[in-house]
């Protein structure tokens, strides 16, 4: 492939995958184009794909990519790779969608080795996919005279399985006089507003202060991720995590559920997260209490490397396209 392809996006300013597509385009210094409904150009294009962004359902999303690929080469970065946790019907439909996209694409990128393995497990066959990890910026330094908000925070859109309930249940096990609040930094993912309200009710009945900030501007989000006492990632079915790189870029070292993906990220960026073992709420409760007593441990040590950065990631894409 000669040069950088046209980069396509869906025009959804609130969707993390679409935001990421535009971020990479900015880092490459090339324009990003709104994906057309039909396209008869033969120029090469690249897009970031999740079925939940590209169509009204998994089948429609796959069909859109097939239409684009019919007129010229399309490379794709896959996000939200299908997992059995999608439910039997959802997993089958999403797997069929991703199979069609992989078949239509002239090249495939995954965001981690873990995600590439998930893709192969879902499709039941070997997949040639290039791995380019999600980027993080150099960690911001801890503010002088930092006084944390007495809250445990989960970052990103709320939806069941993101880990909010696990954090609430762990905090509820702490003595009442040493019980921090829990804050969801972000609003409900579309369609999950009722579950968020139910979580608030559950927290209240468990004696846990809980709040959701709703949508946050970039500045407000950055201020809060640096203000809370304990950052936590307890996502139950993670394939890749932009929340992790957001925490790291803000200088925070989140308490993170042990999983193949997060173990890979710890190996990639030593010193940028603290793993805890899932399965027993008491384990998470003890870890939260320990970090509340040792707030310095929730910050990345000065000088800790966090590469690949956004510029590193953009360069990896450019090199991959040039080698094709």
Image (cartoon, grey):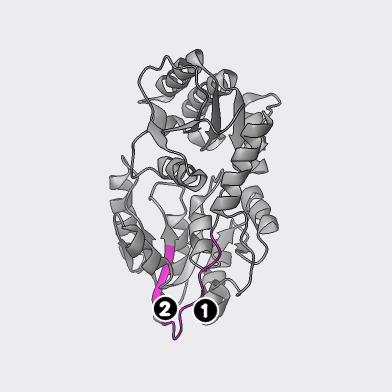
Q: Position of residue 61 (x, y in %)?
A: 43, 24
Residue 104 as seen in the image, left or right of residue 270: left
Give the residue at mark 1: 295
Residue 260 as seen in the image, left or right of residue 46: right
Give the residue at mark 2: 148
Secondary structure beneath disc 2? loop
Determine the residue positioned at 28% across, 52% down: 197
Residue 143 located within the stretch drawn in magenta: yes
Q: Position of residue 6 (x, y in %)?
A: 48, 30
Q: Is residue 182 above or below residue 64?
A: below
Marks 2/1 in contact by CB < 8 Å: the verdict is yes
* Mark 2 residue crowding within 10 angstroms, few (<14) / some (14–19) / many (20+): some
* Mark 1 residue crowding within 10 angstroms, few (<14) / some (14–19) / many (20+): some
Q: Please state the extent of the stretch shown in magenta in the rendering.
A: 137-153
Q: CA distance from mark 2 to mark 1?
A: 8 Å
Q: Residue 218 lies in what quarter of the image?
A: bottom left
Determine the residue positioned at 65% across, 67% down: 271
């Amino acid at each position: 492939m000669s040069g950088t392809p046209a980069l396509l996006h869906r025009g959804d300013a609130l969707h993390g995958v679409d935001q990421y597509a535009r971020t990479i385009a900015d880092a490459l210094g090339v324009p990003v184009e709104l994906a057309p409904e039909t396209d008869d150009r033969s120029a090469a294009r690249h897009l970031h794909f999740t079925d939940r962004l590209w169509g009204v359902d998994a089948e429609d999303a796959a069909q859109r990519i097939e239409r684009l690929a019919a007129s010229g080469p399309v490379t794709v970065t896959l996000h939200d790779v299908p997992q059995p946790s999608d439910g039997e019907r959802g997993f089958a439909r999403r797997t069929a969608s991703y199979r069609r996209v992989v078949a239509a694409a002239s090249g495939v990128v995954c965001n981690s080795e873990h995600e590439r393995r998930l893709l192969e497990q879902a499709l039941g066959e070997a997949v040639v996919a290039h791995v380019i990890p999600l980027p993080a910026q150099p960690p911001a330094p801890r503010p002088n005279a930092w006084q944390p908000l007495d809250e445990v925070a989960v970052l990103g859109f709320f939806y069941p399985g993101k880990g909010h309930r696990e954090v609430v249940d762990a905090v509820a096990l702490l003595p009442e006089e040493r019980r921090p609040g829990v804050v969801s930094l972000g609003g409900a993912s579309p369609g999950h507003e009722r579950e968020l309200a139910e979580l608030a009710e559950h927290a209240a009945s468990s004696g846990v202060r809980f709040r959701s900030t709703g949508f946050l501007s970039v500045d407000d989000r950055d201020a809060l991720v640096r203000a809370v006492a304990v950052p936590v990632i307890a996502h139950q079915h993670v394939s890749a995590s932009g929340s992790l790189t957001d925490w790291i870029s803000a200088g925070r070292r989140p308490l993170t559920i042990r999983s193949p993906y997060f173990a890979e990220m710890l190996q990639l960026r030593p010193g940028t997260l603290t793993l805890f073992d899932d399965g027993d709420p008491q384990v998470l409760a003890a870890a939260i209490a320990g970090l509340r007593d040792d707030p310095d441990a929730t910050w990345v040590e000065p000088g800790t490397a966090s590469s690949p950065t956004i510029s590193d990631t953009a360069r990896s894409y450019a090199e991959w396209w040039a080698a094709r």
